[in-house]
Amino acid sequence: MTEDIIVELKVKNPRVTEELTKVIASIEGFRLDKRFPDKPCDLLILEIGDDLKEEFKLIHTMQSSKKVGSIYLTSSRLEPEVLIEALRAGAREFFSQPIKVEEVRRALLKFKETRTKYTDGKAKKRKGKLIHIIGSKGGVGVTTIAVNLAAGLVGHDRSVALVDMNLTFSELPIFLDVKESFDWAEIGKNISRVDSTLLKSSLYKHPSGIFLLTSPTGLDGVNQTTPDTIGKLMEVMQSTFEYTIIDGGPLLEDLSLKIMETADTVIVVGVLNLLSLNNIKRLLWTFQNLGYPKKETIKIILNRYEKDPVLTVKESEQSIDHSFSWLIPNDFKTTMTAINLGKIILEVGKNTDISKSFRDLAASILGGSVPEKEKTGFWNKFKKTGL
């Protein structure tokens, strides 16, 4: 028999206290024990707003005392800085005021379900696929491929997260017209408390269905985040989403290497010219010396492919001793229109070759085949090896 979940309320607003008490009492398995307000509890619901500095200090003290399992916060203040501090403090849920009864009820039921699974020893960790995309050099279209591959996977009814690890030239917010969102440095500060529920509620959800995790805007967040923290964050991402796409930019550094070490697939993006091909060859050599990623997990995508190029596909593959997995046709107009509008290519140019290419690429990653009748004349000239 599962023990009751002990809830403690530290709420000043009498109306909010009354509403929360009614919701807690309506769900079997929860107990609000008012006789021992300072005893250990499984869940604390705390109201904040008068003196944020002191209140968040109190939260950290409670967490350190080990007397509180999880913390939910409630407040009538909804300023961005309040929400950011709540995330930093490790709050699992945030209830705005006036209280929305159904929102609180759903959160409590989710808490109960998670606790029951772990209590019964039946918790199962789903391990989604981690795809790391890097460029052979700057400007080859890594972000374009990351965004539209993610959109293509969402189009196949998969849960997909997109993570911005391009620390030098972060462009994902522009590509998806995102003004504000939590970044991975903020979330990483409380990585020991981050679970799938908190993570998903912290990410920006694009209208396409993609969940976005941006990179820090300043160097402080980057410098304070360790490879170990990023590794743990990726574990939570994989337990939350079926596919996590990493926009890694053109650089290799400690955080990117940590992700690449455990990635299911590493996609190297290049274009068909000598400079890009030479850099791809150097990257493959670097991977070989590092010992990861393994050759079978490395896929090379050529972006902006033109018909009848000066360098042929066969010659280029021979020069780098590695086959190409996919060709993305060149469509400057559709691509730039999508970027300037902050939309995905699949939305702006639904019937273009480049949109079909991304849809086919997503199908290939999912293990499906592309019907011959759906291949364009462009594709019939090239035998795809798939991903």
Image (tube, rainbow, N blue to C red):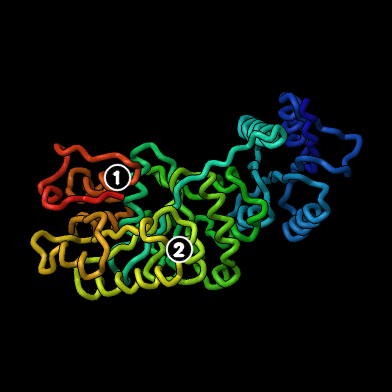
Q: Quadrant of the N terminus?
A: top right
- Residue 173 appearing in the image: no
Q: Quadrant of residue 284?
A: bottom left
Q: Residue at x 36, y 72 (%)?
A: 285
Mark 2 element type: loop
Does 145 sit left or right of 331 as displayed? Answer: right
Image: 251 above or below 301: below
Amino acid at dot 1: Ser
Q: Residues within 10 Å of mark 1 (few under 14, many from 20)?
A: some
- Residue that mark 2 sits on: 165
Looking at the image, which is closer to me, 298 or 70?
298
Looking at the image, which is closer to me, 137 or 206?
137
Q: Quadrant of residue 24?
A: top right
- Residue that mark 1 sits on: 364
Q: Residue furthest left?
A: 308
Q: Residue at x 15, y 67 (%)?
A: 315
Amino acid at dot 2: Met
**Location of residue 226 in the rendering, given as x and y in whole percent from the top left corner:** 59, 67
- Residue 271 appearing in the image: yes
Q: Residues within 10 Å of mark 2 (few under 14, many from 20)?
A: many
Task: Compute the Cα span from label 1 to label 2.
Answer: 24 Å
Mark 1 element type: helix
Looking at the image, which is closer to me, 92 or 361?
361
Q: Residue at x 75, y 27 (%)?
A: 29
